Amino acid sequence: MTKEERLAWWHEARFGMFIHWGLYAKLAGAWNGEKIPGIGEWIMRNAKIPIPEYEKLADDFNPVKFDADAWAEVARQAGMKYLVITAKHHDGFCMFDSPSNPYNIVKRTPFARDPMKELAAACNKRGIRMCFYYSQALDWHAEGGAGHWDEVGEGAGWLSYARPAEDFQKYLDNVVKPNLRELLTNYGPVGLIWFDTPVAITPEQSASIRDFVHELQPACLVSGRIGHGVGDYGSLGDNEHPKGAVRGAWETPATLNDTWGYKTDDHNWKSLDYLLDLLVNCASKGVNYLLNVGPTAEGVIPPPSVDLLKQVGEWLSRNGEAIYGTQASPFPVDPAWGRITCKGNTVYLLIKQWPAGDLRLSGLKSAVKGGRLLGCPDVAVTFQQDGDTLALSLPANSPEELVAVVAVDVEGPLSVERMLVQEGDLPIELPTHAAEITGTMEASPAGVMAGWATDGQSACWAFRVKTPGIYKVAAVTRVHRGHKELYGEPDVEAVVNGKTLHGKVDLSRLDMSEDAKAYQLLPTPLGDVAFEQTGDYTLTLTASKFDLPPRSEFNPDAPRGFSLVAVNVAPSAS
């Protein structure tokens, strides 16, 4: 079976449920009466709990309120099409009946049931794909597993692995592969294995595990966090918004609050606005959205999680046509009013900012046949098309509180202008994912071109100005305020419309206050340029004089240098 065949259902699904559940839920973020900083499922390591002490949690772990049908029903009502649950997290405890590993929920707890078996049956009844999370490298319990802090000493870092390589190979052979065989032979069809945190694993070991999974279930996907780029699809950072359409298959794992595993005192629930924003943004970039819940030790999904997911599901019941089975926006940048997806001969306009007048879309070359407002079959949507500019007449008020969707049906194959086109008199954003890059640089799925530290490289954009005038040009970088040594302060030069503009990155402008964000966007002004007439232009950006300090001992392999996000070309206020 080919990778594309394995991915067919996954692209159609677009939205899944993540579940982090294990012994750590019993501690709920506290150890010996003390609240432990960090995410809930990492408490064994963060609190440095000895293995014998942590093992005792299993003696009275008894989730008597666990109801597989109730959990699967929450996923169904949320509009989720697959479910990924932690079969084994970094603490090494198996949440399934493992013949090869007695340290599991059936043999070590008074619960003595296999929740994975019950959940697989409940998902199957509802047409939800059952999937498993499995920590293949970090294992703080098993002999040979990576991440044992007592072996590497204080301050060595959670990625450290001190034992000989042959010990880790024995762990893969004696723990990981037997567990995977059990998961892939005892629970029916498995949609995917969600691996995590490869750390000590080698490229050959990652490929070996991937092949092992495919041998047991050829249709089962292997997630990108198996390591070394050998998975069936890639994983963005936790809660990471993709900036532009990504190449290949990607997924964003995300939390409903700040933790993955349950913590009693984490009530920082995300708003429905935030959840829908990430959902529609991921879909518009061709990225799946895997949203997490952290059940209690009794087996209850926290009510705020259930309420939020139900609201997302209600929105999807009206607007899911614009999410499920769609592809990334074919337009080079997002419009100011929202996001775009497409499917066949239909373009979906996901409108976050309802217009006061007509809704305008620039760059659509295909002839429009008609438009419709999802969830409102009786509402007429009229339009005018002038070249590649579409103007839609919509009702005065949005039918949705947050995101409304207009479906635009076109004639023949969908055709759009790939050049960056200014909308009216709005600023023009030149993002890294839309640049033609000379050299070894490339933009990440998050839209950051990190580690630009050598001369002879450039980023070039072609764009169309629709409103003549004087424009201010600025290069926007992303900087972590806690690791300024990674970036330096290079000179930056932009050539546009026959004029050369200069600037210098100034890290002293970062907000270093206690409440400031860790990652900050830092604009570097380059100067003004005049566009005297409507037309097509290019801008080429280069950087030099990087003057980077020595590599950080904290993270010696991190990319250093100019970390470009975009170039902004904004109308001058004067």
Image: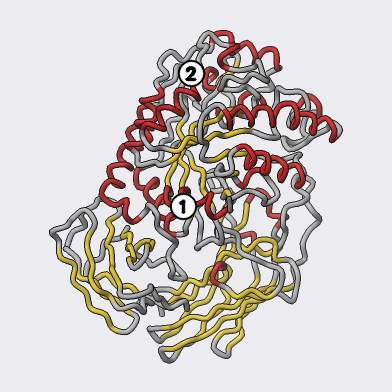
CB-based contact (under 8 Å), mark 1 and mark 2: no
Residue at which label 2 appears: 297
Q: Position of residue 493 (x, y in %)?
A: 64, 78
Q: Is residue 258 above or below residue 459?
A: above
How many numbered badges does the structure rendering display?
Answer: 2
Which residue is at the far left? 378
Q: Residue at x 49, y 21 (%)?
A: 115
Coloration mode: secondary structure
193 relative to 312 in the view: left or right: right
Question: Can see residue 517?
Answer: yes
Q: Position of residue 63 (x, y in %)?
A: 46, 15
The CA span between labels 1 and 2 is 33 Å
Q: Amino acid at mark 2?
A: Ala
Callout 2 secondary element: loop
Depth order, front residue of 492/348: 348
Q: Quadrant of residue 167?
A: top right
